[in-house]
Image (spheres, rainbow, N blue to C red):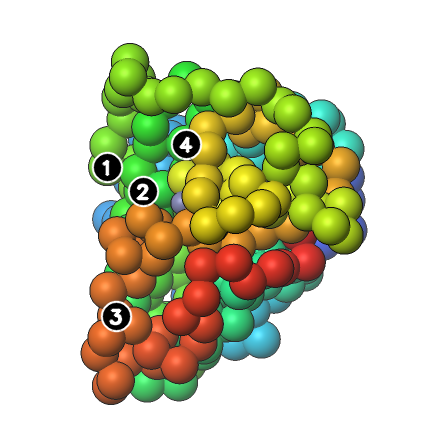
Amino acid sequence: MTLGIRPTADADATISSARARLDPEFASLLDPFLHQLEVDDETVVCGTWPDLRLAFLNKGWFLALKQHHPRPEESDRWGLGRNILDGIHGPLKSFFETNLRHCLEKSVPWHHRYECSSPNEFREYQMNVLPLPRQAGLLILHFLTERRPHEERRVLHHPEEQTFRDRDGFIIQCSYCRRVRKADGEPSWHWVPEWVATSPSKTSHGLCRDCLLAYFDALVDVDSPAATSVPPNNVVRGDG
Ligand SMILES: [Zn+2]
């Protein structure tokens, strides 16, 4: 499968949702990794400069964006030169920034598993971050590792605003499993398919306890940069 890389000198050009983008200056840095770039369209690949500005987006990147954000203007907002951290919300932003910078500065790969489910499917991804030689940037690949229909016994909840909006009017959604947190009582997270398909207004992001335990085991490893960057708290409000 080809990547359909199309070099462009115009970083500000309007982005087509099905077209890859590659900064010509970045292209030569990818030479040692070309064999890793022979991936299918479901694999999302991007490259960044050392300051984490995007220098490469593959076709899979735009296909995934279209899947998660069907509105065309969302694709138009993303292009070369934008900081990759702009797309990460809540407590995860500092977690990703810390680990990406660690990968870059120490020239060590970083791997992270995460969930990004749709209303109908459980989907899990593996992210591999590879440092480019001489700290020139990062190559980031996201592989789909598991995909299956949600369990039939999963309890569905209706999008009841009064149940889920907190006292400040926010709905808090887990960044990974995309369940939403009940507004009162003990923290509990629930599956509201309508709000996975379309985020309600004033959605904020956090991490539920299940995802914290499943994907952030590095929290207990004091030597890991992740240990200091994700608050050990499952109700942190983000800016999403
Ligand atoms: Zn979760």
Which comes sooner in the sequence, label 2 or label 3?
2
Residue under the image location 29 percent in, 72 percent down: 219
Look at the numbered discs 2 and 1 and tell me whether their residues touch, using CB distance below 8 Å: yes
**Residue beneath disc 3:** 218
Label at residue 117: 4
Q: Residue at x 32, y 48 (%)?
A: 210
Q: Residue at x 23, y 37 (%)?
A: 145
What's the distance in space between the residues labelled 2 and 3, CA to CA? 17 Å
Q: Relative to residue 194, is residue 36 drawn left or right?
A: left
Q: Residues within 10 Å of mark 4 (few under 14, many from 20)?
A: many
CA separation, marks 2 and 4?
A: 10 Å
Taking the spot 46% from the left edge, 50% from the top edge, the residue there is 186
Q: Point out the tag, 1 or 3, that comes first from the N-terminus.
A: 1
- Which of discs 2 and 3 lies nearer the camera? The answer is 3
Compared with 99, 36 (above or below) is: above
Q: Amino acid at mark 3?
A: Ala
Disc 3 on helix, strand or loop? helix
Residue at which label 2 appears = 125
Relative image position of residue 25 (x, y in whole percent): 56, 64
**Secondary element at image label 2:** strand
Front tag of 1 and 3: 3
Q: Label 4 CB, ligand 1: below 8 Å?
A: no
Q: Which quadrant of the figure contains the N terminus?
A: top left
CB within 8 Å, label 3 to label 4: no
Question: At numbered mark 4, what does the secondary structure look like: helix, strand or loop?
Answer: loop
- Outermost residue on the top side: it is 152
Q: Within the image, what quadrant is residue 189 found in?
A: top left
Q: Is residue 68 above or below residue 171?
A: above
Residue type for callout 2? Tyr
